[in-house]
Image: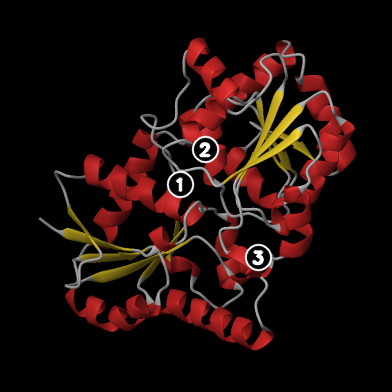
């Protein structure tokens, strides 16, 4: 039976999308393709397919040896543009790191992107479009699902969230590109609504905008709770206590948090970024300014017919990204590239 060697060090940085995507993809393939492939994790001996989830130097150095045994795949979770707005790096280090990143992607036989928008981005770095395949992220319905009402009440009490308030949730690393400043400004204009942000400084003080954001987290408005980094095992609790997910990011790939939220039929409000159009279709609420966001949240807070419609849209979007559908894409891909 052919082997797929999954290679990753994403576990070294907690509460980041790459780790979540890695966990879900490996679980999906291990369970869904166990009759077709043997999956190994960070095995020194190359497999028939060597699937690189992170771009460690040790992995880069292993690529020529892996090609002798089988084929190589890089899973692209980020490109220089997304790093640029996430981390504050010294100019020389940044130049070297970006060049290394692109060289890693060029070195493998195949590339999988989590968003079709990034196919064109990679082409600007002279990466052949023919070696790039789009396969979206996925989340397990066993991990992310709706709780009964009594359990939801207990979780709200645990986090001191008023039972009668409309709850707006943001999820992700605390970074400038995530739109944290707009998130807080919207909250200030809607003092009767509870805002919660789950996530923290996964990369510490090198996070872009760290000083300014740290002041906000230490002294947030009364209706905003920054609850810090939440383990993946506990994140379903957080989705269950919210009424709306709000991510005003300025730059993204394919946030795992969106897939997690729509698993519970939670409506999603996003900035009108081009990259969302081909992956979320018309199933999400969108705005381009603080005023837009305030208007939309105000309309949703009454949980009327419009709110129910957007809950249903989240359900429809979730169906498109079902485990069954994404597993089929992975099976087709692995079958195609197997030697």
Q: CA distance from mark 3 to mark 1?
A: 25 Å
Q: Position of residue 301 (x, y in %)?
A: 76, 19
Q: Position of residue 70 (x, y in %)?
A: 21, 71
Q: Earlier in the sequence, mark 3 or mark 2?
A: 3
Which residue is at a point 57% across and 64% down the rendered structure image? 203
**Between 10 and 136, which is closer to the camera in this rendering?**
10
Q: CA distance from mark 3 to mark 2?
A: 25 Å
In the picture, the disc for residue 259 is 2
Which residue is at a point 77% across and 14% down the rendered structure image? 302
Q: Where is 134 relative to 282, above or below? A: below
The secondary structure type at the circle numbered 3 is loop
**Between 238 and 299, which is closer to the camera in this rendering?**
238
Q: Residues within 10 Å of mark 1 (few under 14, many from 20)?
A: many
- Please identify the quarter of the rendering in which residue 145 is found: top left
The answer to whether 272 appears left or right of 278 in the picture is: right
Q: Residues within 10 Å of mark 2 (few under 14, many from 20)?
A: many
In the picture, the disc for residue 207 is 3
Mark 3 or 1, closer to the camera: 3
Colouring scheme, one of rainbow, by chain, secondary structure, one colour: secondary structure
Res. 317 in view? no
Circle 1 sits on which residue? 137
Q: Earlier in the sequence, mark 3 or mark 1?
A: 1
Q: Position of residue 282 (x, y in %)?
A: 66, 33
The answer to whether 198 appears left or right of 220 in the picture is: left
The secondary structure type at the circle numbered 1 is loop
The secondary structure type at the circle numbered 2 is helix
Q: Where is 295 relative to 59, above or below? A: above
**Between 288 and 230, which is closer to the camera in this rendering?**
230
């Amino acid at each position: 039976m052919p082997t797929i060697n999954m290679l990753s060090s994403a576990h070294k940085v907690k509460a980041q999308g790459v780790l979540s995507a890695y966990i879900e993809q490996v679980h999906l393939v291990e369970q869904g393709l166990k009759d077709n492939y043997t999956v190994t994790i960070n095995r020194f001996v190359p497999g028939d397919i060597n699937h690189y989830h992170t771009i460690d130097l040790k992995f880069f150095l292993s690529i020529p040896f892996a090609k002798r045994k089988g084929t190589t795949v890089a899973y692209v979770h980020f490109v220089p543009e997304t790093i640029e707005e996430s981390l504050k790096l010294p100019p020389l280090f940044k130049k070297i790191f970006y060049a290394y990143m692109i060289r890693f992607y060029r070195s493998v036989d195949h590339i999988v992107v989590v968003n079709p928008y990034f196919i064109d981005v990679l082409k600007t770095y002279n990466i052949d479009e023919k070696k790039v395949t789009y396969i979206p992220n996925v989340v397990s319905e066993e991990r992310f699902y709706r709780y009964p009402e009594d359990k939801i009440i207990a979780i709200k009490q645990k986090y001191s969230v008023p039972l009668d308030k409309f709850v707006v949730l943001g999820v992700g690393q605390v970074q400038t590109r995530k739109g944290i400043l707009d998130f807080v400004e919207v909250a200030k204009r809607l003092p009767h609504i509870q805002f919660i942000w789950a996530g923290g400084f996964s990369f510490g003080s090198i996070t872009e905008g760290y000083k300014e954001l740290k002041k906000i987290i230490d002294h947030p408005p009364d209706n905003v709770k920054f609850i810090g980094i939440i383990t993946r095992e506990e994140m379903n609790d957080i989705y269950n206590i919210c009424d709306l997910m709000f991510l005003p990011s300025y730059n993204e790939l394919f946030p795992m948090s969106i897939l997690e939220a729509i698993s519970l039929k939670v409506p999603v409000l996003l900035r009108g970024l081009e990259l969302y159009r081909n992956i979320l279709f018309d199933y999400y609420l969108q705005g381009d300014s603080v005023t837009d966001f305030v208007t939309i949240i105000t309309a949703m807070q009454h949980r009327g017919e419009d709110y129910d419609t957007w809950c249903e849209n989240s359900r429809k979007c979730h169906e498109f990204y079902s485990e069954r559908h994404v597993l089929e894409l992975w099976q087709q891909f692995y079958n195609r590239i197997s030697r």
